Amino acid sequence: MKPTVQIKDKTFELSIPAAQIDLAVDTIAKEIDRDLIGKEPLFLVVLNGAFMFASDLMKKVTIPCQISFVKLASYQGTGSTGKIKELIGLNEDITNRTVVVVEDIVDTGITMEKIINTLQAKNPKEIRVATFFHKPEALQRPVPLNYVGMKIPNDFIVGYGLDYDGLGRNLPDIYTLKTE
Ligand code: IMP
Ligand code: MG
């Protein structure tokens, strides 16, 4: 029997242990070090979900870089609302900068498309995307994903920054919604 957690009305089953996550973060950090050396990238971490991935990733990236935080929420409960809010909290001038958007997960891609369009209007040199999780089956928008930690099935997950109704973000492992 897999360990489970109960969050409100739902039961989630352990699916990806923290050690496996850590290996994937290592890989992304090495790719970023290799690709972006000399570019002094600005990492834009998308709150709230990406806080844990960003913290792990930034400890492993060794090239000179800057880190800042933005927010754009479009998700409630276990279904995408399709409602798009504005990107807030961008205080840096990104003109001619190499920007790396750091996200927890790209699901439909609607959120990432919005973020990329907003940033693109500010004339950066280049926008790259680092997302820890990606659900290829759910993707509805053609967003370029430069760094992907793990491709996962189209199931609802919690942990490692991802929440169900605001809860579960602190879990170091990933748990998947039990459906039966
Ligand atoms: P998208 O716009 O459909 O790509 O949704 C992206 C956002 O939805 C992410 O930044 C998450 O906040 C949220 N999200 C998508 N899938 C999950 C999931 O399985 N668990 C928790 N949040 C999710
Ligand atoms: Mg998010």
Image (spheres, helix red, strand yellow):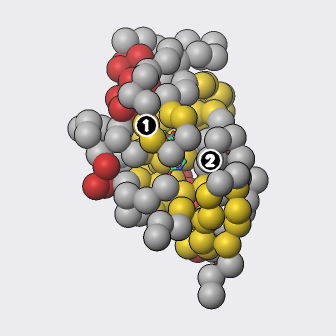
At label 2, the amino acid type is Tyr
Residue lying at the far bottom in this picture: please name it.
1
Tell me if mark 1 has few (under 14), some (14-19) or many (20+) residues whose alpha carbon lies within 10 angstroms of its own: few
Reading the image, the residue beneath label 1 is 80
Q: Position of residue 135 (x, y in %)?
A: 37, 54
Toward the viewer: 12 or 47? 12
Where residue 47 sits, quadrant-wise, is top right
At label 1, the amino acid type is Ser
Image point (36%, 32%), residue name:
110
The CB of the residue at mark 1 lies under 8 Å from ligand 1: yes
Reading the image, the residue beneath label 2 is 164
Q: Is residue 63 visible?
A: no
Toward the viewer: 162 or 56? 162
Q: Position of residue 122 (x, y in %)?
A: 42, 12
Identify the disc placed on residue 154: none
Q: Is residue 112 above or below residue 70?
A: below
Q: Position of residue 51 (x, y in %)?
A: 68, 43
Q: Quadrant of the N terminus?
A: bottom right
The CB of the residue at mark 2 lies under 8 Å from ligand 1: yes
